[in-house]
Amino acid sequence: MTTSTILVIAKEPLPGRVKTRLTPPYSPEEAAGLAAASLADTLGTVLAAPASRRVLVLEGRPGPWLPSGIEVVPQSGGGLDERLAAAFGACTGPALLVGMDTPQITPALLAPALGPDAWQDCDAWFGPAFDGGFWALGLAEPDPRLLRGVPMSRPDTGALQRARLTGAGLRVRDLPWLRDVDTADDAGEVAAAAPHSRFAAALTRLATATGQPGRGEGR
């Protein structure tokens, strides 16, 4: 069993509060449903992955999408960099953080950063995202200073965050590139990559009900 903590940073999937770039073509309620499915997939993967502690760092309140076995703590205030920094700052020992926007993650995908040799000759794990951000960040020794002040939600956020790590002298290993679900096009691509996920099923139901393109179909 690994000694690592897995952190999931997430918002409560409420209409108008999450996945706003999916509207249009989807309504705020439909976008929130997709977000809830994505979060449920992510938490399912976290439960199946080896960890000493599994924590949902949540803005909002838990809902029916929350399985048992996940500890819930509230997000701190401030910008996203401050909230990520605070999440790591509450950890003792190695920690791996993922977001709620990559329902295609699997235990196998996370395994390199959670195995018994994950931190041998390694100080940080970095999962780059195709939108320029990052979907995962692991730290052998969580230090909030490694995140505070990094500009978030920009095309160069991932590059800047990785540079912060290497600039601090950390030995960084990379996880595979993944696509976040930000837009309707992203939703189709991610669902096609994880066809058996709750997210893919939710997108298929919407496609059937609304006539919107489904898995792997361009918009």
Image (cartoon, helix red, strand yellow):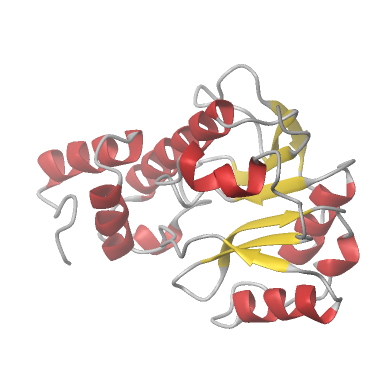
Residue 33 percent across, percent down from the top left: 38, 39
Front-most of residues 130 and 63:
130
Is any part of residue 6 visible from this angle? yes
Front-most of residues 93 and 71:
93
Residue 181 percent across, percent down from the top left: 40, 57
The quarter of the picture where residue 208 lies is: top left
Residue 64 percent across, percent down from the top left: 51, 22
Which residue is outermost to the top?
68
The quarter of the picture where residue 163 lies is: bottom right
Q: Give left or right: position of 101 versus 95.
A: left
Front-most of residues 5 and 197:
5
Q: Residue at x 16, y 50 (%)?
A: 214
Quadrant where the image shows the N terminus: top right
| 110 to 24, vertically: above or below | above
Q: Residue at x 27, y 34 (%)?
A: 196
Q: Residue at x 76, y 46 (%)?
A: 95
Q: Residue at x 37, y 43 (%)?
A: 34
Quadrant where the image shows the C terminus: bottom left
Is any part of residue 8 visible from this angle? no
Q: Give left or right: position of 141 versus 63.
A: right
| 20 to 204, vertically: above or below | below
Residue 144 percent across, percent down from the top left: 88, 60
Front-most of residues 26 and 39:
39
Q: Give left or right: position of 128 versus 217.
A: right
